[in-house]
Amino acid sequence: MASYEAKLTSKGQLTLPVELRRKWALKAGESVEFHLDHTGTVRVRPRNLPASAIFGMLADLKRDPAYESDDDAIGAQLVADDEATMSKRRKPRAA
């Protein structure tokens, strides 16, 4: 994975490295988007791409054979997330 560096100016501005501007075909005045996820990771992407550019981005994802449906997988993740947060607060008493 390539790594790039940019310095922040006193006005809070960044200059994107020329390699990224070329790769993304960015022109003056076009926008980039910064996305901060729950782990603190920042993702940057150009905003000059047409909506059709997203087609096929998830094509390499495979179904997890442990679950019969997407709903089952989502439900299992919700339960796991809830149990993880339960340890931080008082667990309910067994009935």
Image (cartoon, rainbow, N blue to C red):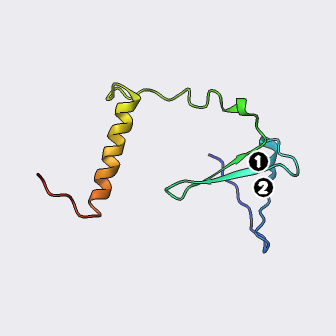
Category of crowding for the residue at label 2, using alpha-carbon neighbours closer than 10 angstroms: few (below 14), some (14–19), many (at least 20): some
Q: Which image quarter holds the N terminus? A: top right
> Residue 42's quadrant in the figure?
bottom right
| SS type, badge 2 | loop
Q: CA distance from mark 2 to mark 1?
A: 7 Å
Residue 61 on image: x %, y %: 50, 29
Q: How many marks?
A: 2
Q: Is residue 55 above or below residue 9?
A: above
Q: Quadrant of residue 48?
A: top right
Residue 35: give x, y in percent of width and height.
62, 52
Disc 2 marks which residue?
Answer: 16
View extreme (left): residue:
95
- Residue placed most toward the observer, 29 or 92: 92
Tag 2: amino acid? Leu
- Say what amino acid the circle numbered 1 marks: Leu
Tell which residue pokes out farthest to the front in this image. 95
Residue at 46 percent across and 27 percent down: it is 62
SS at mark 1?
helix
Residue drawn at x 80%, y 47% is: 21
Name of the residue lying farthest toward the right: 28
The relative height of residue 94 versus residue 69 in the rendered view (above or below) is below
